[in-house]
Amino acid sequence: MNHVTCALTIAGTDPSGGAGIQADLKTFQELKCYGMSVITSAVAQNTTGVKDIHHLPLDFLEKQLQSISEDMPVHALKTGMIAQKDMMKVIAEWIPEINAYYVMDPVMISQSGDSLSEEESREVLRKQLLPLTSLVTPNIPEAEEITGKRIETEEDMKEAAEAIVKNFGAGAALVKGGHRAGAAIDYLFDGNEIHAFESERIQTENTHGTGCTYSAAITAYLAQGLSLVEAVKQAKYFVTEAIRYSFDLGHGSGPTNHFATREEVSNKWI
Ligand SMILES: Nc1ncnc2c1ncn2[C@@H]1O[C@H](COP(=O)(O)OP(=O)(O)O)[C@@H](O)[C@H]1O
Ligand SMILES: Cc1ncc(COP(=O)(O)O)c(N)n1
């Protein structure tokens, strides 16, 4: 029997293909995982922003989840946009049924500044979802929201990562520095120590979907059996190259390039 590594994303959609479910599936495919997806909300958006959001009914979300658990293996899963607290509750009840790594990208606000989650869902995210995670990957505003503390310095980023594990029960926390100036440094607290993952800052506006792509890549590598630190290291390389060779598509913040780590592609698209 052949062995297929299976990764699942539970997230919202992006018809323009750069973020959300679409970015996750492209990343899974590129990293040689069999990709599966459960949709929380259909989002009418593109590189310039969000026009409208249609939340799928709760019982339909449940049926999608059941469709996976009664039939398909899952080696690792990630969640992205989960806008409403009741959706979070359904997902939090379902995750323990699945014996898999769980990476949470706590999506709150899009790159374009649009809200992708309801304020009142934060408490459920903290109390019910975070304790189930193997890893949570907040950007700076999201880490501030989770911890209730301002993050200005690199020291603050490390403290936030540690607090998210120690005070909120996450398995590990990766606080991403994409929203700061200077080098793009992310800090991981794995429960024992802090690890830094650094790349140069690439001068581009094309960062639509970077967080989605990064967490999907980590999920794919965990599904394949890499250690947490190795999975983040490889995923950081993947997302950095995806930003470096990002596409000048659309009229706003363009999408990352999921083929970028292929040698033949990065030679071609400079
Ligand atoms: N201009 C950039 N150059 C290089 N790396 C970047 C750049 N912008 C973001 N990153 C990296 O992309 C990843 C996603 O980070 P971030 O933008 O903070 O997340 P989000 O998309 O969730 O807001 C992180 O590893 C971050 O360091
Ligand atoms: C459905 C969905 N999920 C997440 C994001 C955030 O993406 P990013 O902040 O990386 O642009 C997005 N724009 N749409």
Image (cartoon, rainbow, N blue to C red):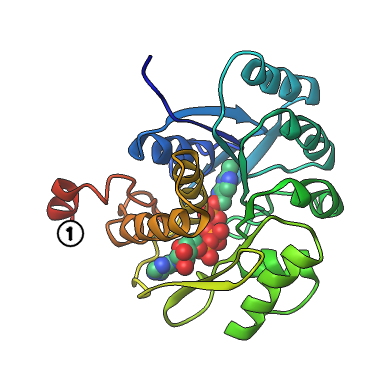
Give the camera-side residue of 252 and 103.
Answer: 103
Location of the N terminus by quadrant is top left
Quickly name the residue at label 1.
Answer: 270
Identified by mark 1, the residue type is Ile
Location of the C terminus by quadrant is bottom left
Relative image position of residue 248 (x, y in whole percent) = 30, 54
Q: Judge whether 80 appears above or below 37 on screen.
A: below
Residue at x 61%, y 28% (from the top left corner): 38
- As drawn, is 32 to the left or to the right of 65? left
Relative image position of residue 54 (x, y in whole percent) = 69, 32
Relative image position of residue 85 (x, y in whole percent) = 83, 42
Decide if residue 252 is in sight here. no
Relative image position of residue 191 (x, y in whole percent) = 66, 64
Residue at x 40%, y 23% (from the top left corner): 3
Mark 1: give few (<14), some (14-19) or many (20+) Cα within 10 Å. few
Q: Judge whether 76 appears above or below 140 on screen.
A: above
Q: Judge whether 3 appears above or below 92 on screen.
A: above
- Ligand 1 neighbours mark 1 (CB distance < 8 Å): no
Residue at x 80%, y 60% (from the top left corner): 168
Decide if residue 230 is in sight here. yes
- As drawn, is 57 to the left or to the right of 27? right
Q: Quadrant of residue 237?
A: bottom left
Secondary structure type for disc 1: loop
